[in-house]
Image (spheres, grey):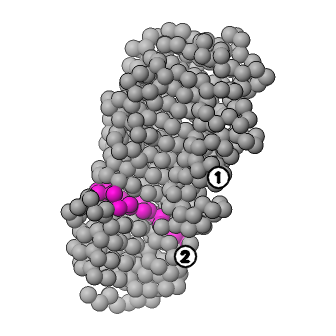
Amino acid sequence: MNRRGFVSSLCVGGAALLGGCSGLRQGTRGKPGTDDEEGPVQDPVPSPSPTPGPPYADQFDRVVNVVRAGADPEGGESIVSLVKEELRDDTLLYFPAGEYLVDDRIHQLEFSNVGLVGRDATFVPEPGMEVAMFDFGRANRASDILLDGLTFDFTAPNTGPRPLNVQAGGQMVVRDVWVRGTQDIGEGMMRFDVTHPDGTGVVERLRLPDGSTREVDSAGCLVGDNHRGRIQFLDCHVEGFSNNGLYAGPERGTVQVHGGYFANCRIASLRVGSNSYVSGAHVRCDRSPDDFGNMRGLRLRQGRNILIEDTLIEMVNVSGSEGGLVLAPWLEEATIRNTSIKVEYDDIPAIRLKGPADAIGLPGGRVRFEDISIVGAAAGGAAVNVTRRDGVQFEGILVEQSGSNRDGFVFDQTNGATVSDATIRVTGEPIVRRNSTVRTVNVRYPGPRDQPPLP
């Protein structure tokens, strides 16, 4: 099949998923590898060829079995020169089972319709190597890339190049990529930018479970400044990074996250910005790496047109944190609904809504919470902390925090806020108003505080 056939098959398979939020199957909250984890109902990318031979072989004009072409599958000799020689337009490079040594950057900035597919293929970087292993594409220079079944071995000490840096238009497909081992040098793990406004990307079952050491200041997966199109993350696992986990808050383009497990990262385990949709994600902090400092769960960094739904956030053990769900000062508009937050660590809010940056000049009413459950045994502080966010709305809220001296809501310098159809069961004050006006409608205060707060 030629390039047009490959792109057509991508578009047909991914139309429902890449067209927007409607019609998308919500992801699961299960941790990868457990029985409750499911894949997407509809396969958004082309499936491997049913006939024997390299997967996807019928979707490229040219297929190269790299071992037959001379690559060493036992890791004794570098594959860099061979890959550079064989990788060209409308070409699939197939890596049979084995270990492949990469001792330098494989740099391919211009291409059209290329693929790297492995079957039990593991890529081993040269010790001390810090440049990207596979550096593919740049804006307006590359389109259509498929990467499937690639494992990177980072188990040796002094290991940490960026495995994949992909910046391309057209269709980007990344599936079943796994990094085994902890990154202890370099900076940054994966990067995927869809560089054209009409381009689409799917990153499915990306596995980064072993994270990085504190010294490298590494984000697990970055959607960078050159992103312009739409990219979707399906059932990914990102954990233990010294910077953000999934760092997907570009100023432009669209990001969608469906399912997946994001855990124990410094700054935020999952971070999104403008034009983002998160559904069915599981975000958890349950261990405290040395010197990680501020470990937020889910952070909404900036912009508008953000929807978070059907997501679970758990804050069990951290080295420090502003909260489970943190809305930054540059955040203009967001809706969070059907989401559960569990907080067991003392003095940490489930929700922290910061005052807007002065340059934004926000009118009120653009941040809304619907059907939110906040539970756990955290003591001290408050479950919800709101500062200078006029018009914020909380509807259908359950707050049950059993730790001592724990307040429900604290509003600071906030006017026109609303709390409706809520149950607040805490050991401290249900609602604290500090130079704020808060309207309550159908709010229950069972438990240790049976009386409503003073106006």
| Residues drawn in magenta | 323-344
- Asked if residue 332 lies in the magenta stretch, the reply is yes
Decide: marks 2, 1 in contact (CB < 8 A)?
no
Disc 2 crowd rating (10 Å Cα; few below 14, some 14-19, many 20+) is: many
Residue 375 highlighted magenta (yes or no):
no
The residue to which callout 1 is attached is 215
Residue 290 seen in render: yes
Note whether residue 9 is visible. Answer: no
**Which residue lies at the image location 40% right of the left edge and 56% below the top edge?**
300
Name the residue rendered at 76%, 24% in the picture: 75
Other residues around mark 1 within 10 Å, as few (<14) / some (14–19) / many (≥20)? few
What amino acid is at disc 1?
Glu
Horizontal placement of 191 versus 442: left or right? right
Question: Of marks 2 and 1, which one's residue comes earlier in the chain?
Answer: 1
Alpha carbon separation for disc pair 2 and 1:
27 Å
Q: Where 147 sits versus 21, above or below?
A: above
Assign a secondary structure to mark 1. helix
The amino acid marked with disc number 2 is Asp
Residue 337, position as x, y percentages in the image? 36, 59
Whole-percent x, y for residue 377 in the image: 54, 76
Q: Nearer the viewer, mark 2 or mark 1?
A: 1
Residue 343: image tag: none
Look at the image and tell me in which quarter the C terminus lies. bottom left
Q: Which residue is mark 2?
A: 346
Residue 12 sits in quarter:
top left
Residue 209's x, y, as percent? 63, 47
Q: Is residue 189 above or below residue 167?
A: below
In-front residue for pair 274/206: 274
